[in-house]
Each structure stands twice: as structure tokens, then as C-alpha cells.
Amino acid sequence: MESKRALEEADGDVRQAQALLMQQGLAKAEKKSGRAAQQGIVEPYIHGGGRIAALVEINCETDFVARTGDFKSLAHDVAMQVAAMAPRYVAEQDIPDEEWAGLESEFGDRKKALEAVSLLDQPFIKDPKVTIRDLNKAAISKLGENVIVRRFARFEIGTDQPAAEAGDD
Amino acid sequence: MESKRALEEADGDVRQAQALLMQQGLAKAEKKSGRAAQQGIVEPYIHGGGRIAALVEINCETDFVARTGDFKSLAHDVAMQVAAMAPRYVAEQDIPDEEWAGLESEFGDRKKALEAVSLLDQPFIKDPKVTIRDLNKAAISKLGENVIVRRFARFEIGTDQPAAEAGDD
């Protein structure tokens, strides 16, 4: 239907119709990721008999989606990622400017630092070809709602890492 | 054995022996609460199918004690308390000075504010005659090790509460 309408709007010009469709698709995705995500679940992951544990909050738009297996599976994967890979922030924008110098010297360069400390930029431990951001996008596409990795906490016995909270991603 | 030794030290004076025993007991408890507690567990508590969840870290001195049922039971109770009663800090000393004016006007007076926002000062939901601090002390006494409620996180879908971390209690 959308293709047909785009072709009509473009007076039969296929290229122009494709450009129109792409614009419309992007506009839709943007609309979704701007939409209020006030539902969701908080999911724990416990490792090593309680020596390490993570808690993540993942938001979506409706309670219906929050109860789906796909949504719960995303929450489980992200909680496991946090427990295993100890990110420090949800996303790049949450890293304070004054942290960057230290992070770059700790990890070698800015890109490596970002992949180490930003949860959304980490390679997914169960499939390192994709990032957590990719998982998140795939969930948005599959569930048809905005989905946000909102915040996490990770406690490990004998260490001091604080909890991280997302900015307005 | 300790009573007999105290009686001997007090030359048979029962009152003096009792005073000696009390002093020794307090000294022991103080010694324990100053001892390094680097073992422990991180315990989650999930409520409402994942709409509210808490994570607490409770420390003790040895892995042996961390595996006991009494220690796990304390961790479970404290995690449930955090999920249900939403404290904002572990202890009074973690409340920033500049927060007090707002807390006192929010809760009526300083005592009520403290019982509302400081986990250790909250009445225990399963037995409001005791506080979480009392539970903690009872665990120290029963387990014979220093036990510390170290930090917690509490996430509730649709709210914004950050995680709390203990000072040097």
C-alpha cells in the first residue's frame, strides 16, 4: 500500500518513490524512538552464586509488549551483558566530558574506550558481531514500539562500581 | 569460661564481674564492626512481575558465613525491605547536609524523615518493632562476624530513583 501511494505521489518515478519511502521509514522510526516509554520491566541477573549481580530497567510503551517473550528475552540478554561485561554508562552521552582523557589512556583510544564502558556500544557477548544498540533496534523493529535501555546497576563483591542511569537517548 | 575469668579478675565481686563482661562484650562488637568485610552476596528481590526490583549487597568477613542460611535470610529480608519501602540512603551519614531541610518539610520532622529515607533506620516491614539496624546487629551477634549493608539499587518502572551507596558505616 505504502509503495503504491509513494509511486502515485512521485508520478510513477520509481527512484523518487524509493526516496519518499525511505524518508517515511526514517520519520516513523524517529517518531517511535521519541515516543514515551513508561512501561517495561526490571530484570536481574545473578552470577557466581551472588558474587556478581546486575539489575536493568528496560522500557517500552505498553504493558502488553512488556509481557511478551521477545521483550523479556531482550531484558535477560542485557542484564547478562551488564553482569558479564561491567559497562559503566548506558550510552556515550552519559560519559562526563572530564572522564574522556582518563578513559582514552586506560583503553588505548576513544573507540575502544567507548566499546568498553558504554553498554549500548558494547559487542553483545552472545554474538559479538552486533552491539547492544543493534539488539535494542531489532527489538524496536520487531515489537513495533519504542524500547529504551533505561538504567542499570551492577554490584560485585569486593568492588565499588556505582549504578548508571541513561540520559535522554 | 569468660564469666569465671571475669569473676576471678573482679576478686569474686559479682557486680564488678558483670561490668567487666559488658565492657568486654562491647569491645568485641566494636572490634567486629571495624573489621574488613570483603565477602558477602548480592541479592535481588523482584516484585509485581518486574515492575519493582531491588538489589542489595551485604558484606561479611568470610565466604563460609556468606553461604550460611542466616546470612542469606538477612540479605533476602533487606532486599525485600528496599523493594517495599524505597529507602533513599543506606544510613544517616549518607544523607547530604543540604537535603535535610527538604526532607524535614517533606516528612514532618527529622526523626520521621530519617525513618523514611535511611534503610538502617526503617522499621522492618515483617516486624516493625525492630529496625533494619537491629536486624544487622542481630546477624553480627549470631554469625560472629562483621556484617555490613553495603549498598542497594531500587528500580521502579515509571520512576527515577537513583541507587544508594553506603558511606563508611
Image (spheres, coloured by chain):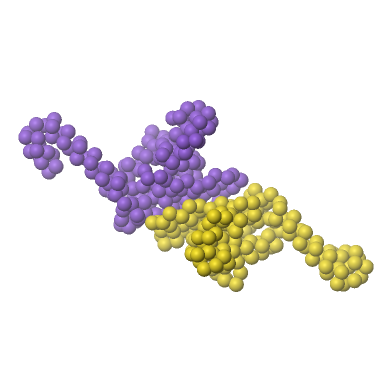
Chain colours: A purple, B yellow
Q: How many marks?
A: 0
Q: Is residue B19 left or right of residue A60?
A: right
> What is the quadrant of residue A15 in the picture?
top left
Does residue A12 lie above or below B58 as drawn? above
Q: Is residue B81 left or right of residue B37?
A: left
Q: Is residue A67 left or right of residue B94?
A: left
* Towards the viewer: A32 or B147: A32
The outermost residue toward the right is: B11
* Towards the viewer: B35 or B98: B98
- Residue B115 in view, yes or no: no
* Towards the viewer: A83 or A17: A17
Q: At which x and y percent is residue A117?
A: 47, 37
Q: Is residue A116 left or right of residue B78?
A: left
Residue depicted at 24% across the width and 39% down the height: A26
Residue depicted at 14% across the width and 42% down the height: A2
Residue depicted at 41% across the width and 39% down the height: A93
Does residue A89 lie above or below B141 as drawn? above
Quarter of the image containing the N terminus of chain B?
bottom right
- Residue A100 in view, yes or no: yes
Quarter of the image containing the C terminus of chain B?
bottom right
Q: At which x and y percent is residue B16?
A: 87, 69
Residue depicted at 56% across the width and 46% down the height: A156
Q: At which x and y percent is residue A60?
A: 33, 51
Q: At which x and y percent is residue B47?
A: 45, 61
